[in-house]
Image (tube, rainbow, N blue to C red):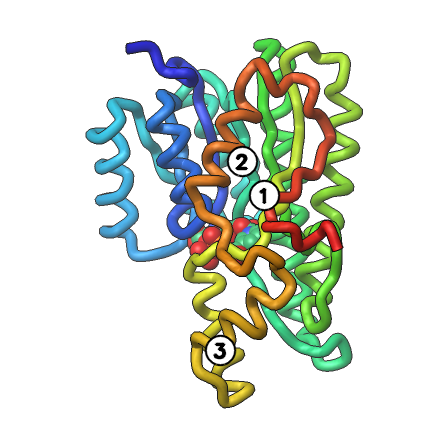
Amino acid sequence: MLRPLDGRTALVTGSTSGIGLGLARRLAEAGAHVMLNGFGDRAEIEAERRRIETEYGVRALYSDADMRDREAIAHMVAGAEEAFGSVDILVNNAGIQHVAPVEDFPPDKWDAIVAINLSSSFYTTRAALPGMRRRGWGRIVNIASAHGLVASPFKAAYVAAKHGLVGLTKTVGLETAEDANITCNAICPGYVRTPLVDGQIRDQARAHGLSEEDVIRDVILAAQPNKRFVTIEELGALLLFLCSDNALSFNGAALPIDGGWTAR
Ligand code: NAD
């Protein structure tokens, strides 16, 4: 049976865990060969890579490129192009978080968040776009956040980087607007239950002396009117739509998928 992304290739940054891994699996299920990237236990990553290949009958590769290292990023994109012949779908997903008042925000954390959550997308895009233009087909999907559209206190670096990523998305969308089959969009999720959010739940529970259930209801989901986490399945469905021909008029858009958070 023909799948929607048969013959396509995808690179998903930060795909050894959470949203990135879920999106890479969804792309593979739809037929795309995928390159995984991110940190973690090497044996677990290798097992996941093989599972993707056997479950979905595609090729899966892995790059350990650090998204703070622009040369490693260029090397990763070149490696994917060499192995697959192309990078058709680029999903910029790698991200980290740190929560602190702005005057106490550790400068090293600021630098790392801006590098991983924002600058890495500039470096992957500039490396992958020429090939997309040559082949006349490409999708760049940046995983921003509701925090790319609105702010919360104590997340200065994350909010600044995600707003920056939305700005990069708009600019690349405009620069590719006349390339008939290339688009660049941002997905802006509300809270998704992943290891990144589990860490915040634990930290907040400790800091405020609350139970994890109370933190989820009163702190984490306080801004999310529907009071439920966004699911990785919902994000995967949106990503697949953005990769389809029906989405060609979406370009430079920042798409909230946040249970109404940014409707306020
Ligand atoms: P996660 O911690 O589960 O996964 C992050 C991934 O990024 C991992 O694969 C990790 O190895 C990788 N990574 C971290 N630093 C890296 C580096 N220097 N180089 C390469 N890879 C690196 O987090 P997640 O919740 O799945 O988040 C994924 C993305 O989605 C992030 O950009 C995050 O900001 C965004 N997001 C998450 C939520 C949420 O509620 N979880 C909401 C909105 C947006």
Residue at image mark 3? 214
Q: Position of residue 161 (x, y in %)?
A: 70, 54
Q: Quadrant of the N terminus?
A: top left
- Residue 194, numbered circle: none
Residue at image mark 2? 91
- Confirm if mark 1 falls within 8 A of ligand 1: yes
Residue type, label 1: Ile
Q: Secondary structure at mark 1?
A: strand
First in sequence: mark 3 or mark 2?
Answer: 2
* 225 or 61: nearer the viewer: 225
Residue type, label 3: Asp
How far apart in space, not on screen, are marks 3 and 2 (Cα)? Answer: 33 Å
User: Is the residue marked by circle 1 packed among few (<14), some (14-19), or many (20+) residues within 10 Å?
Assistant: many
Q: Nearer the viewer, mark 1 or mark 3?
A: 3
- Confirm if mark 2 falls within 8 A of ligand 1: no
* Labels in figure, total: 3
User: Is the residue marked by circle 3 packed among few (<14), some (14-19), or many (20+) residues within 10 Å?
Assistant: some
Q: Secondary structure at mark 2?
A: strand
State the residue at coordinates (68%, 10%).
Answer: 180
Residue 68 in view (yes/no): no
